[in-house]
C-alpha cells in the first residue's frame, strides 16, 4: 500500500511556469540584462534559482550577478506569482489531495524552491493544509535530482522508500525518486514533455491529476 506521496510544486500542483517566466523576465529587466527566450527560462524550471540564473547568464553560481538576480526574482515573485496562485491550481488538485489525505495517505512536498516561497505559494493557493511537510532546496545540501530531498522527507515522516511515491513534472523529480528507491508518477501537463519524462523511467504516467490520484489510490505489493 502506498502510504506517502511526495509532490513537486511548480508544474505539478500549480500551473506556475508561465508566471515564473514572467518573474524571471522582470528580474532580467531590473538587472538591465537582455531577456533570455521564454523557452530557455522554462527549461530551467525545476532547478534551484542559483543554478537557473547561472545557466541563463552564462556565469558561475557564486558570482554576484547571480545573487542579485535571485534577490530580484524573490521580490517580484511576491507581486507577480502569489496574487495569481488561486487561479493557477491545476484542475482536480484540491479535491484529489483531500481525497488522498482523508483516505489516510500522508502528503509532502519536495521542491526546488526555497522553503519560504514554497510555503507562501502553497498558502496563497489554498493547498498548505494538505501537507504534513514541505522541504525546500535551502533545507538540503544537494537539491533535486539528487535523492537527498526525498530521503529527508522519508526520515522526517518515518516512512520506508518502498512505501512512498514521488509525483512530478520534470526528470529532476523522477531521477530523485529512483535514486532514493521510491516509485514515481510522471505528470505530462507540466514543464517536461512526455518523451523527456519517459527517459527517466517513471513507474506510472498521468495526463491529469485525477489519473495521479487513481495511481496513488491503488494497492501495490510492497517489498518487505
Image (cartoon, grey):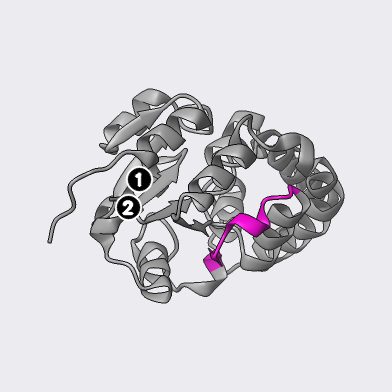
Q: What residue is rendered at 36% in x and 73% in y?
A: 158
Q: What residue is rendered at 42% in x and 71% in y?
A: 157
Label 1–label 2 contact, CB within 8 A: yes
Can residue 27 be seen here? The reply is yes
Mark 1 nearby-residue class (10 Å; few <14, some 14–19, many ≥20): many
Residue 204 lies, in percent from the top left, at 31, 33
Numbered range of the magenta stretch? 125-137
Q: What residue is rendered at 33% in x and 62% in y?
A: 147
> Where residue 174 is drawn, which disc sits there?
1
Give the Cα distance between marks 1 and 2: 5 Å
Position of residue 119 relative to residue 175, above or below, is below
Closer-to-camera residue (55/96):
96
Mark 2 nearby-residue class (10 Å; few <14, some 14–19, many ≥20): many
Closer-to-camera residue (183/132):
132
Please identify the quadrant where the C terminus is shown.
bottom left
Residue 102 lies, in percent from the top left, at 53, 51
Residue 112 lies, in percent from the top left, at 54, 57
Residue 116 lies, in percent from the top left, at 69, 67
According to the picture, the residue beneath numbered tag 2 turns out to be 177
With 10 as the anchor, is 156 left or right in this view? left
The image quadrant that residue 6 belongs to is bottom left
Amino acid at each position: 500500500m502506498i502510504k506517502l506521496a511526495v509532490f513537486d510544486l511548480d508544474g505539478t500542483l500549480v500551473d506556475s511556469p508561465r508566471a515564473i517566466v514572467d518573474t524571471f523576465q522582470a528580474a532580467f529587466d531590473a538587472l538591465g540584462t537582455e531577456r533570455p527566450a521564454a523557452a530557455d527560462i522554462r527549461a530551467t524550471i525545476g532547478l534551484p534559482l542559483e543554478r537557473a540564473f547561472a545557466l541563463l547568464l552564462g556565469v558561475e553560481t557564486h558570482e554576484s550577478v547571480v545573487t542579485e538576480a535571485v534577490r530580484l526574482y524573490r521580490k517580484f515573485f511576491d507581486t507577480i506569482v502569489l496574487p495569481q496562485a488561486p487561479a493557477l491550481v491545476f484542475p482536480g488538485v484540491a479535491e484529489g489531495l483531500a481525497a488522498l489525505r482523508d483516505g489516510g495517505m500522508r502528503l509532502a512536498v519536495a521542491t526546488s524552491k526555497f522553503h519560504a516561497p514554497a510555503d507562501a505559494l502553497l498558502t496563497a493557493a489554498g493547498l498548505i493544509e494538505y501537507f504534513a511537510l514541505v522541504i525546500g532546496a535551502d533545507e538540503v545540501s544537494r537539491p533535486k535530482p539528487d535523492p537527498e530531498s526525498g530521503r529527508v522527507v522519508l526520515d522526517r515522516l518515518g516512512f520506508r522508500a518502498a512505501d512512498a511515491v514521488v509525483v512530478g513534472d520534470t526528470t529532476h523529480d523522477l531521477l530523485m525518486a529512483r535514486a532514493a528507491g521510491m516509485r514515481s508518477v510522471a505528470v505530462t501537463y507540466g514543464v517536461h514533455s512526455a518523451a523527456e519524462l519517459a527517459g527517466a523511467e517513471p513507474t506510472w504516467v498521468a495526463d491529469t491529476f485525477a489519473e495521479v490520484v487513481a495511481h496513488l489510490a491503488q494497492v501495490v505489493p510492497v517489498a518487505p
